[in-house]
Amino acid sequence: MNTVSRRQFLHITGTLAGATLLTSISFSGRASAAAPALVPRKLPFPPNDEFGSYEPTITPDGNTIYFARFAGSGDTRVLGTTTDIFVTRRVRHKPGAFGLDRGEALLAALEGGAACLTFASGMAAATAVFLALRPGDHVVAPQVMYWGLRNWLKSAAAEWGLVVDFVDASATDALASAVRPGRTKLIWIESPANPTWPITDIAAAAEIARGAGARLAVDSTVATPLLTRPIALGADIVMHSATKYLNGHSDVVAGALVAARHDELWERIAAIRTGNGAILGSFEAWLLLRGMRTLHLRVERCCRTAQSIAEHFVGHRRVAAVLYPGLPEHPGHAVAARQMLGGFGGMLSIRVAGGERAAIATAAQVTVWKRATSLGGVESLIEHRASIEGPGSAAPGDLLRLSVGIEDVADLIGDLEQALAATG
Ligand SMILES: Cc1ncc(COP(=O)(O)O)c(C=O)c1O
């Protein structure tokens, strides 16, 4: 039996509306014998018709959970905050049957789309688009793109029967000559694209897709909905690994698709999400919404800091090249300046003079940057991309990928300076 004093209890749960965001977990099915003891308290929010009843409890580690018992279903699940009840569609077979998904509504609004679906990961979201196509369909994809999806396209998508051509998507001509009118069903692009950050002209790609009777899908993970609006530029589907900037705290794996319109393809994608069990969990959906509340602040800061870091290391004697679309010498700068509004993103790469060994040694020397894969969180990350991707990686051996967080820009530059100096 877990006992807490009244003071502790009030501290944990918060007594004023809006005072505390609670750490919560969701439960499916009936509470087990190990479930925490129920601690009665006055609820900070009014009952809602969707639920039979609420029961707040405190777990042995001091967190609060709000259970909702769904009337008539015998089902117990939910999580909540003092300001907000946020319930997501945990029932796979009845998506949309209850609850509201504010995260999906928010993303659809940010992207200017007609609908949004969140997924259990970025990969789940991306692959749902390809799985909604038919065997034999032709797809055009970029040579430079997130390596996990590229590998999936080369293996599982090929087994499913898709015919995928990889082209230089930063060259509009290459995209135009790759499409096969009548047969190409999808052009997939990523902009800026991992890990060298080429830019694709989204409006031009949309026109090519339209001319060929194909759809255009854009992995806009790095641009975020704040910097680029692919739907306004003519895209049909926008994809995000919400694991990254949208969540922003490196504690959620999630994905999202936003559609320009409801149509048959979108219906198939929704059915795949349901059938494959690729729906986002309640807790992750709640964390994602929490993260998106600060998206505008984080993205603005990341862009400013990334721009400063890029400018600082251009021409540095231990840096062979800085790859960042915000630099005028970047080949995609003119297009990026047109289609990215308010900044060029928080991702850049440097190619270390001295090659692969020097690059790896530099990554080993940093203390402010964290050596980790992933991107888009509040903490700045550095990685030797070719090592992460392994055999077959298209990343140059001397390349370090930098995901700029929200730390002090001078600390980040100083740390890279000392790491480069130590290895030179
Ligand atoms: C640009 C991009 N798209 C898609 C993904 C896949 O997302 P997730 O890791 O959420 O499955 C990633 C992951 O690193 C990514 O960087």
Image (cartoon, rainbow, N blue to C red):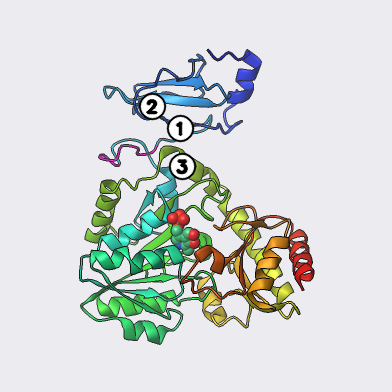
Q: Position of residue 382 (x, y in %)?
A: 63, 62
Q: Position of residue 157 (x, y in %)?
A: 30, 65
Q: CA distance from mark 3 to mark 2?
A: 22 Å
Look at 70% across and 68% down and name the residue there: 309
The amino acid beneath tag 1 is Ile
Q: Is residue 229 above or below residue 167?
A: above
Front-most of residues 404 and 400: 400
Q: Earlier in the sequence, mark 1 or mark 3?
A: 1
Look at 50% across and 42% down and name the residue there: 287
Helix, strand or loop status at disc 1: loop
Left/right placement of residue 344 relative to residue 253 reads right
Q: Earlier in the sequence, mark 3 or mark 2?
A: 2
- Magenta highlight range: 88-95
Front-most of residues 64 and 415: 415
Look at 52% across and 15% down and name the residue there: 41
Q: Quadrant of residue 148?
A: bottom left
The amino acid beneath tag 3 is Glu
Look at 79% across and 67% down and name the residue there: 422
Q: Is residue 345 above or below residue 80?
A: below
Q: CA distance from mark 1 to mark 2?
A: 9 Å
Name the residue tied to disc 2: 48
Name the residue tied to disc 1: 85
> 10 Å neighbourhood of mark 2: few (<14), some, or many (≥20)?
few
